[in-house]
Image (cartoon, rainbow, N blue to C red):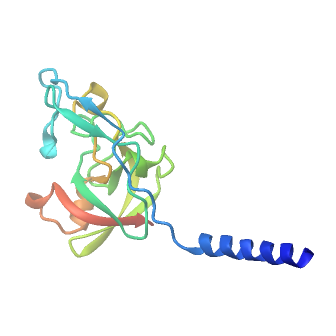
Amino acid sequence: MRNIILSLSIFMLLVLLIANSFEVEAKPCRPSGKIRGKKPPPHKCNRNNDSECCIEGKLYTTYNCSPPVTSRTKGFLTLNSFEKGQDGGGPSECDKKFHSDDIPTVALSTGWFNKMSRCFHNITIRGNGRSALAMVVDECDSTKGCDEPHDYQPPCDNNIVDASKAVWKALGVPEHDQGGLDITWSDA
C-alpha cells in the first residue's frame, strides 16, 4: 500500500511539474467600461500634435489593463508634448513636472504604466527601422478622459506609447509623418 501511495504521489508531482512548465498564454486585455464624451469648454482642448478632443455624447472605451509586456511588445506610438501649455495637459504623473520636447520621454497606457512602477525607467522603442531609448515620465490614462485633468481628450487605447518629438526624431521619422506609428518596445 505504501508503494502505491508513493508511486501516486510521484506521478502527481510529475503531472504538476509538466503542467507548470508549459507557457500559458496571458489573458487578453479586455475593455473595462465606457465613458460618455462631454463637450470641452471653449478653448480648453489643445489640438496640437493632432490631439483629438472629446465629442459630446460619444462613448469611449476604457481599459484597466494593457497587453502583456514581452521582449518585443507591440504598441502604437503617438506624438505628445510634455511641455507646459501643450497637448499633454498637466504635469507628468511621475514627478509633477513638465519636460522639454527635446528630451526623449514617453507616457505609457495605464496597464503598462503599472501604478507608476515604470516611472523614470528607460524603455527601448523600435520602429521605422531604428531604435530609441526613452524615459517613462507619465501615464497615458486608459481609464479616464473627457475632463479638465485630461485636457478634454478621450481615454488612451491600451497599447499607447505617447512620445516626445525627441523620440520621433531618434527614430528618424520626418516631422510631417509624426503622429502614429506601429512599434515594438521593451524595458531597457
Could you tell me which quadrant the N terminus lies in? Answer: bottom right
The residue closer to the viewer here, 47 or 156, is: 156
- 103 in relation to 3, above or below: above
Q: Residue at x 47, y 52 (%)?
A: 118
Q: Residue at x 15, y 58 (%)?
A: 178
- Where residue 131 appears, x then y in whole percent? 30, 71
Q: Which sits in the foreground, 2 or 64?
A: 2
Eyeballing the image, is 92 above or below 38? below
Location of residue 103 by image quarter: bottom left
Residue 154 visible to an observer of this rendering: no
Q: Quadrant of the C terminus?
A: bottom left
- How many tags in the picture? 0
The residue that appears at 12% across and 25% down in the rendered structure is 43
The percent coordinates of residue 18 (x first, y second) are 63, 76
Nearer to me, 7 or 163: 7
Outermost residue on the top side: it is: 41
Provide residue 164's location: percent of width, then percent of height. 26, 53
Question: Farthest residue in the left direction?
Answer: 176
**Rendered image quadrant of residue 68:** bottom left
In the picture, measured across the screen, residue 12 lies left or right of residue 101, that is right
Q: Nearer the viewer, residue 99 or 123?
A: 123
Does residue 81 sit above or below 177 in this rendering? above
Residue 26 in the image: x percent, y percent? 45, 61
Q: Residue furthest right?
A: 2
Residue 68 in view here: yes
Looking at the rendering, which quadrant does residue 126 occupy?
bottom left
